[in-house]
Image (tube, grey):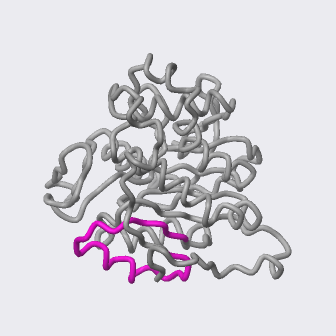
């Protein structure tokens, strides 16, 4: 395990790789719900896609930090986050309209920026797709192998739902051709003083802020039917937005009811026909389970 202020070494030797591997999975944020999700994460995401796992996660100064020792990868970093209100040089000039500029999301943009600094070149050179995810998704069945479904590597794949007028990036599958630009774009946009007036004229949640970035780069989004939902290990687990609830019938903790039902409804479909397909809905590509 690597600590903050290290030189952030990584284990891949680019000279020994003749062709790109298909997938890397990169986890960020705090290590929430690991005791609940780890078995399914390994089975339905990492092993299903034969993916390499990377972590750049934050200390919470609680017992959950110890979960980093459960991950079977050499590419894991845990660090104490800085005061992001000081990192973002325009923070004091930005009006605090809605939540896109709140501390947890500033930390998110900073995390992505750090992932780019540390792993960006490796992701770009050695993988076809990089799946960026928070830790607390409980995968109920296998994640789709996008490369076997669609050959268009200009699509950014996100879960359907939980979009709030913008883009849901809590789990996003990014082509390596865009990964460095994606990871750095949010940090760079906020650091550019030329964007202050425009942002101060908007009332943005984080999903809408992400859509501004996507529109600026003309990036295209595709939707994936949910095979997972955000969970917790107990009702008292750390949470930023939304209270944690417990579903007695399904015996799971959850944060968002709509997300929970989307995932379990998809599980029923998968149990009847475990075949992913792709279609267009309102000119957006949509990977879903055949009925």
Residue 49 versus residue 136: which sits nearer the camera? 136
Query: Residue 73: percent from the left, percent from the top?
Result: 53, 81
Single out the residue that lies furthest toward the top. 201
Residue 78 versus residue 64: which sits nearer the camera? 78
Q: Quadrant of residue 194?
A: top right
**Is residue 15 positioned above or below 157 on the image?**
below
**Is residue 143 positioned above or below 59 on the image?**
above
Q: Does the magenta portion include 21? A: no
* Residue 74 as seen in the image, left or right of residue 13: left
Q: How many marks?
A: 0
Residue 77 versus residue 127: which sits nearer the camera? 77
Query: Residue 42: percent from the left, percent from the top?
Result: 47, 73
Q: Does the magenta portion include 62? A: yes
What residue is shown at x 56% (from left), y 60% (from top)? 115
Which portion, as a residue range, is magenta?
A: 54-76
What residue is shown at x 51% (from left), y 65% (from top)? 45
Query: Residue 203: percent from the left, percent from the top?
Result: 38, 21
Query: Residue 130: percent from the left, percent from the top?
Result: 62, 58
Residue 248 versus residue 256: which sits nearer the camera? 256
Q: Quadrant of residue 145?
A: bottom right
What residue is shown at x 45% (from left), y 61% (from top)? 28
* Residue 280 as seen in the image, left or right of residue 209: right
* Residue 168 as seen in the image, left or right of residue 62: right
């Amino acid at each position: 395990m690597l600590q903050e202020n290290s030189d952030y070494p990584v284990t891949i030797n680019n000279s020994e790789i003749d062709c790109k591997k298909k997938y890397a999975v990169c986890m960020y944020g705090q290590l929430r719900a690991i005791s609940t999700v780890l078995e399914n994460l390994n089975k339905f995401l990492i092993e299903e896609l034969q993916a390499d796992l990377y972590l750049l996660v934050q200390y919470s100064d609680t017992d959950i930090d110890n979960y980093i020792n459960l991950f079977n990868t050499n590419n894991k970093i845990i660090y104490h986050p800085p005061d992001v209100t000081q990192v973002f040089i325009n923070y004091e000039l930005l009006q605090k309209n809605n939540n896109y500029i709140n501390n947890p999301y500033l930390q998110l943009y900073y995390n992505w920026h750090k992932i780019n600094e540390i792993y960006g070149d490796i992701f770009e050179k050695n993988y076809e797709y990089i799946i960026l995810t928070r830790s607390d998704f409980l995968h109920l069945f296998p994640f789709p192998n996008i490369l076997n479904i669609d050959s268009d590597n200009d699509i950014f794949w996100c879960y359907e739902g939980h979009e709030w007028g913008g883009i849901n990036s809590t789990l996003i599958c990014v082509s390596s051709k865009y990964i460095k630009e994606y990871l750095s774009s949010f940090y760079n946009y906020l650091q550019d003083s030329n964007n202050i007036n425009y942002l101060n004229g908007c009332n943005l949640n984080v999903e809408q802020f992400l859509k501004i970035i996507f529109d600026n780069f003309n990036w295209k989004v595709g939707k994936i039917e949910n095979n997972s939902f955000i969970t917790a290990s107990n009702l008292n687990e750390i949470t930023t937005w939304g209270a944690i609830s417990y579903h007695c019938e399904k015996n799971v903790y959850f944060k968002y009811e709509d997300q929970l039902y989307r995932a379990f409804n998809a599980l029923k479909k998968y149990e009847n026909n475990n075949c992913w397909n792709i279609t267009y809905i309102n000119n957006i590509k949509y990977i879903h389970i055949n009925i």
